[in-house]
Amino acid sequence: MSRAADLIAFNEATSAEAFASRFGNPDDATARLLSSVVGHVHELIKEFRPTQEQWRKVIDFLTEVGHASDERRQEWVLFSDLVGASALVEEINSRRPAGATPNTIRGPFFRTDTPERPLGSSISLDGIGEPLLVEGRVEDLDGLPIPTAEIITWQANAEGYYENQQPDLQPEFNLRGLFRADQDGRFHYRTVRPAGYGVPGDGPVGRLLAQAGYPLHRPAHLHFMVRAPGFETVTTHIFDASDPRLGEDALFGVRPELVQSFEQTAVDGQARYSLKVRFVMVRARPGRAR
Ligand code: BEZ
Ligand code: FE
């Protein structure tokens, strides 16, 4: 029998099946994925019934997102982050046993070339902001220390900007550092309290969401990536418990175990705030991305 006999005729009721019926091998993984994605798109079109002009606007928006993406800015990643898709993929793939530190999205401001700094040093290269002492411990699920774990941190300044957003105003690598935990899995460094900030709203994704009244705010936080041989890498945030907008994170990163108080203190006569963090890592599991 000819292939044409297996093809389903296209009309409003059969559109998704008509598309799927054109694959030579419908069980091929790509064919199944595409049939499913296209099926959902057809369902959406049938639900919203856009005019040709409205559909053209959707295509124009997607084109703009593509044009706004280059090696310095990834508007598609921002799109995925802001609609919760990145958080959902993270949630599905990085589910960890109770007690382990959860993963959250990495975001666009991480730098792979973050310089290593000695324990106790300051990552605030311009000294602007309220001093904060961060002390932490990296341990396994049994509470045993993970010596020499590598901790990379990056954060916004007291005005809510990352160093790579303000190359003319902040010193390079300001508020970034790579630290190596000691034999007890402990590390400490000095910094300044970060402020919450607005996710970049100057591109097509931010503009679209802001127009629709969607909040683009992120509550104050520090970012961490913790690595140790034989353990799953932890990429996470610590959020400031006193931020009044903690419940409004545009990127769905806030988890109760990632919210910490920045305690007022006078330790060492310098730091005005202190923060204690604990990262609990799980052993690398076969078949899972590190
Ligand atoms: C961030 O927290 O650095 C961030 C993450 C995703 C999009 C924008 C900012
Ligand atoms: Fe951030």
Image: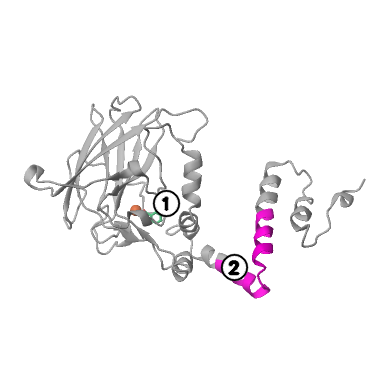
- Residue ID at (23%, 42%): 117
Alpha-carbon neighbours of circle 2 within 10 Å: few (<14), some, or many (≥20)?
A: few
Viewport quadrant of the C terminus: top left
Q: Residues in magenta? A: 38-61
> Where is residue 192 shown, x and y percent of the image?
20, 52
The one nearer the camera, 69 or 26, is 26
**Residue 21 shown left or right of residue 286 in the figure:** right
Q: Look at the picture and state if 154 lies above or below 230.
A: below
- Residue ID at (49%, 47%): 88
- Residue on which the image places disc 2: 58
Q: Look at the picture and state if 128 lies above or below 90.
A: below
The one nearer the camera, 132 or 71, is 132
- Residue on which the image places disc 1: 252
Q: Look at the picture and state if 156 lies above or below 144.
A: below
- Residue ID at (48%, 68%): 208
> Where is residue 104 shown, x and y percent of the image?
41, 45
> Where is residue 34 shown, x and y percent of the image?
67, 50
Prevailing secondary structure of the magenta residues: helix
Q: Spatial distance from mark 2 to mark 1, Cα to Cα? A: 25 Å
- Residue ID at (77%, 59%): 13
